[in-house]
Amino acid sequence: MKTLEVLFTLILILSSISLTFRQRGVTTINLIMIATNYVLLIGTIMTIGANWRMIPAYFVLMLLTLQVFVKPKSTIVSKNLRMKIIKTSGIVVATITMFTLPTLFPIMYFPEPTGKYTVGTQTFHLTDKNRKEFVVPNHQVNRELMIQVYYPAEKETGQPSPYFKDIDALTQQLATTQGFPNIATTHLGLTKTHSYQDATAIKSKEKFPLLLFAHGMSLYSRQNTFQLEELVSHGYIVVALNFTGDAATTIFPDGDRVDFTPIENTITFLNNRIHLWEQDASFVLDEVIKGDFDKNFRAIASLIDYDSIGMLGHSFGGATSAQMLVKDNRIKAAIDMDGGLYGDSMPKNGPEKPFMLMNAEASINFMKEAYNQQPGNRDELFAEAYLRNKTIEKPGVYTAIIPKTNHGSFTDLAAVSPIINESGADVNAIYKLINELSLGFFDKNLKGIQDNKLNKIQKAHPEINLTLH
């Protein structure tokens, strides 16, 4: 819970006790208590926003208000033991409810980026006139994509960026694709980012490495805001792709909306589908290098070091990053976050370029269980992922397994609720570790910074088994 929410709730509880066991009606003390509650209510709404998580608190405040102003001359407080027990039980239940909902469904927030650069962001629309659209029935003739670009920006320019422009569309689709109750994510619109929409690109002679980011199947381009903002703050430019039809939702400038199109969850389908994602990534990289698809992108394009390009992704996006590393000479280094290595088989000698595979502890356990055909887990995707992980353990490749994590731990959605995380998981600590690994890896392999950051992480966190093969 946010500090203001906690304060509001505590004052409500104290007011409930006072009005229940001391004196109801219009008295100076009661008026002060009610006024204080409303000041805190207005403060929370102005600072955080009204939201469903606080409905029990709003309801309790309404009841307290009625106790003061309905029959204001009635100041009698029941002395009957039975009534006291009932009222006490009511206060206990209300207290538990008021604290439980905001705790189980906190407002998502991200640690402030630690780098020196302000983070700017802009959204762009691209159309590939050389490819037809086949994923989305009855859509446009050519393949269209939306990209979210993050870049070092001038301070005090732009407006604070929303987490997602059409948050209702996103939460509806997350309910459909991730199995979240729709109400459980409607407060994502209250999430504050550390990016500034349409901020002016920094004026600098320094060139910055370029990173492509690929989201997970049925997720979205901004799903790793916690990570992308941190990378940009340390001097990177990130282009986050939104894969039309395979993303949770895609919204084009004209308002046209394309939601996730159901897929076949089979090895054959995924091995074939990844070719589309590779084509999308190559097309976007082509456009970024040309830099003329939008006049607003030109200032950003002038900052890019085109000899230092990397890629990272989560889940199916991580698998795409691995394929791009092998197939596209422009990609110099890549990170796969808990993505099964779908697509074409890895070369015998591995990617022969810097690569890092981070896996969730839960995912590795599922892989082992499936591979060993243990009862209750014979999922062919996990069994195949186990075998393919072994093919990547070649010279120059880093692997790591992060304890107390599952597949979603590598995304912003881990901060939605502790319910969906592994027992004992510290989301902020996990985010920090993922960011340190990502930054250390790309600093070494794209910026040439030899500060042994990865070795330091290895010594500080032996539990992740960070290994350079």
Image: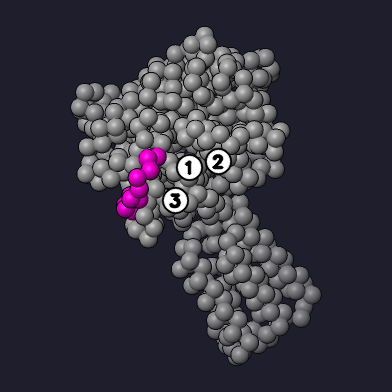
Circle 1 residues within 10 Å: few <14, some 14–19, many ≥20? many
Q: Main secondary structure of the magenta part?
A: loop
Give the side of residue 135 with respect to residue 395, left or right. left
Q: Counting residues from the N terminus, which is met first, the one under dot 3 or under dot 2?
A: 3
**Mark 2 touching mark 1, by CB under 8 A?**
yes
| Magenta region | 197-208
Q: Quadrant of the C terminus?
A: top right
Q: Is any atom of residue 2 visible in this view? A: yes
Look at mark 1 in the image and give the residue it sits on. 231
What number is the disc on residue 328?
none
Q: Which of these two is toward me, 419 or 123?
A: 123
Residue 459 image position (x, y, % from top left):
70, 35
The residue type indicated by label 2 comes to Asn
Circle 3 residues within 10 Å: few <14, some 14–19, many ≥20? many
What number is the disc on residue 117?
3
How is the rendered protein coloured? one colour
Single out the mark in the foreground, 3 or 2: 3
Give the side of residue 299 with respect to residue 351, left or right. left
Q: Counting residues from the N terminus, which is met first, the one under dot 1 or under dot 3?
A: 3
Look at mark 2 in the image and give the residue it sits on. 435
The residue type indicated by label 3 comes to Tyr
The residue type indicated by label 1 comes to Leu
Identity of the residue drawn at 40% across and 40% down? 208
Q: Which of these two is toward me, 231 or 197?
A: 231
